[in-house]
Image: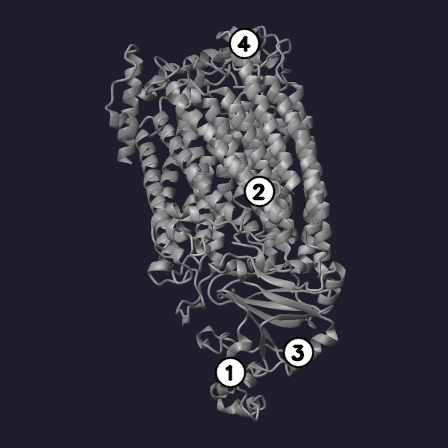
Amino acid sequence: MSTAVSTTEEVIAHGHDHGHDHEHEHHELGFIRKYIFSEDHKTIAKQYLISGILWAFIGGALSIIFRLQLGFPDMSLEWLRPVLGEWIDESGKLDKEFYLALVTMHGTIMVFFVLTAGLSGTFSNFLIPLQIGARDMASGFINMLSYWFFFLSSVIMFSSLFIETGPASGGWVIYPPLSALPQAMPGSGLGMTLWLTSMALFIVSQLMGGINYICTIINLRTRGMTFTKMPLTIWSFFFTAVLGLLSFPVLLSAALLLIFDRSFGTSFYLSEIYIQGQALPNMGGSPILYQHLFWFLGHPEVYIVLLPALGMTSEVIATNARKPIFGYRAMIGSMMGITVLAFIVWAHHMFVTGMNPFLGSVFMFLTLIIAVPSAVKGFNYITTLWKGNIVFTPAMLFSIGLVSLFISGGVTGIILGNSALDINLHDTYFVVAHFHLVMGAASFFGLMAGVYHWFPKMFGRMMNKTAGYIHFWFTFVGVYSVFFPMHYTGIAGFPRRYYSFTALGNDSQAAFTDLNAFISFAAIITFTAQAIFFINFFYSIFKGKRATQNPWKSNTLEWTTPIVPGHGNWEGEIPAVYRWPYDYSKPGSEADFIPQTIPHSATPESNLPEENDEIAKEKEIESLLAAQNESYNR
Amino acid sequence: MNYLVGLLSVVFFILAITVISKSLKLNKNLSGENESDSALDSHNNTNAVGFLLFWLFGTIAGVWSFLHSQPDFLPEAASAHGVKTDSMFWISMAVVTFAFFITNSLLFFFAFQYRNNKNRKATFYPVNHKLEIIWTIIPAIVMAILVFTGWRTWRDITSQAPSNAVVIELTGHQFGWYVRYAGNDDSQLGNINYKLIDETNSLGLDFTDKNTFDDFTASELHLPKGVPVLLKIRAQDVLHSVYLPFHRVKMDAVPGMPTKFWFTPTISTDEMRAKLGKSDFNFKLNCTEICGRGHFGMAITVFVDEPEDYKKWVSEQKPFLTMNPAYLSKVPENLKAKASKYIPAEPIATDSTASEAVSVK
């Protein structure tokens, strides 16, 4: 707590500086404090982003390797031996255990390291202070620690890829007893120890980040920025942080109990096991307990990944459709509904695990309720486009892509959430198709939309738009080509995490040989197309065209900062906020956007009747300036 | 399928060419001024058309690929409940495909229709409570109907097994399945205890329980047609999952926690062979819970026999005790007499092969 206080003082000191000597852009920090152990939320966000991008390439590359096995089962992978060494067996094929390791690490990396840390970590950090009008996070120091815990966790997870027994291989859900018993598979040895260590650190990082996001949003909003004037991005980050803060500790407990079972002879998850010619002494544990604990995080995790993407999409779509987001309050309400329901649907992942079927019925009802707020969000996005005046920036393309993927992947959730139908579809490619579309690809598109949209604010330069368009079209067509056909193999009963499908018998795999080859082919193209982004991103950081103050003509506060904001974000006073962030194409207004900082008294021509009442409140908002400065100077 | 590869490659190619040629044209015409400063550029219409093309080609590819794959989907369910869940699946699928198609079409059409036009201004349309209520209530009603029918089916499937059900025990291990039948003399499975497992007694049969004496094991799963079957499912080492694709049966096998699933096979192996026109067709039992290296190959063959054939098959099977008379020594004194009945006069020269399920090749 004392560190929190002292760093708050540090932040305050920065604010103080800005308040008093405006000419001084920022006091010079050394390279290390400025770029490495930085407490500036913008630098931390960029650290998260670049880590996330690197992780995404690793995670993607792993998936390409196992797609080669699935798509071209007869192909010799001898040429990968220089990279994979012993993991290519004598016959030139992928080792069967390494295949499982690839699947496991692909899932772990994509879910946690890319779409949790890379997405929420980047944009919560970057946008919260900028969009609510704060100098920095509530605690810059904890924020810095959050990144470095993540970094440490990353290093450990990454190193586990190189050990002799291989990384964790029991699926990203690491169900015990498979994950608890090193004799069950080599990946459950040191690889699993590293996985658990890494995830424990990851959770610490998430909790530090989450508590910071919540504190910042509640306490550091600028004058006039009431909750109902916050952009939907901030609302989504807020709900995401709440979800993470309440559910990650449960994963930590699950992991701790697993560590006890693995290392200290307890029997939380183990009972009556006979393995490798040996009867283990453990009695009375329950693997189902682990599944409950895991999915208590695991399901909210889906929304931790998805909500920030949806929030950013709301912002990008409104800005580029030049139209207010349709149903602002319904959007908040549906996100709130999703947040609450996210905690009470977890067992729909467990319909056929031997859980009491009555519980299955309860969770089926709860699960299908969550489809309602999700549907409302979909309809609202579509209505926002209706009669808009759409500018297709790369960010807008990715946002529209997100909405499409969110719908396409979401509808099959209605099928899987039905426990009677889940019996046959559980653990088949139908599930793989479903969650890759709705949470994997949709969130990835949100991430891309965010990068293209806020790149100018991050680096003061623009990304190349044409490369952005090409990147989008390849990715959009590619993602659908990869995941849409997977529904078919799922309906044909192909189970996931299968090295090959020969044991299904009756030569049934032959019918889908071409389809599997097509999926792999599309995956390789899609993955390769990401190079366009990679090059564009790093090239533009250094050589991109200089950004203008407000390149997308957006209403939110971040575009009122200097083009490259320094530590403290605004030179001089933080602007006040007078209106909601979605006054686009307001009737009567000359410009097609009215930033949040413009008081209603300045726009009598476009005020709606009820907004004239807001004018009276402007004095009140302005009078808060002293108090706001006071809070930074205290 | 090669056509689809070709088709989509063409789509990729056309899109790429269009975008690149447009950008080249732009470069030629570029005066280097205002154009590039604005978020709006000459590609705006290209991208709008892109969504329309995506919709068009996507629809064609979707319909075509579905029709193409359809013959290879799992054929008609071979169990009583499976027929119900299948029809529910296709009804739900129709509902969601309708929703999927309508919403995606609107999305892409709006994107195209309302592409930027300098002479137009977007309509300021922030809220409409009536609309919000409509599209909250309609999905809620549809969902309620789907859930309710789903729940009733689920309740029936997971109800108590009928008392005449044939009880069969499946035990998953790395990497295979042991099948155990209750025997010809009683319909009770004897106790098992994992601490009694040895090389021969791979299930850990407990010979202090008299119900064990007539139990027999098999390397294949035989099921009677038209009779309810109760599968009692166990695992020895890690999680496994019993998956009978054609019977629409799936249930995890959990170490330390027996699970169960009952169903009624309705199509015999022979009937299915005739139906599919494949004389070598066989039902399969696969594993669908990741369990290690041999997970993907952890399968045994399932035979659904006509009830009389099934009876015949069962009556031909020899109890484990008959096959392995040495285990008589494990039988407590007071039950020895009862157990001796199963000991053949001539010791059978055999070993544990019968109890070994087919494991990974």
Q: Which residue is mark 3?
A: B314
Q: Quadrant of residue B345?
A: bottom right
Choose the circle earlier in sequence order: 1 or 4: 4
Query: Secondary structure beneath disc 1?
Result: loop
Question: What subunit carries mark 1?
Answer: B
Q: Amino acid at mark 3?
A: Val
Q: Which residue is mark 4?
A: B29
Q: Residue at x 64, y 55 (%)?
A: A508
Q: Amino acid at mark 1?
A: Phe
Contact (Cβ within 8 Å) of mark 1 with mark 4: no
Q: Which residue is mark 1?
A: B207
A294 relative to A406, above or below = below
On the picture, is A550 further left or further right than A331?
A: left
- Cα–Cα span, label 3 and label 4: 84 Å
Specify whether disc 2 shares its chain with disc 3.
no
On the picture, is B73 further left or further right than A111?
A: right
Specify whether disc 1 shares its chain with disc 3.
yes
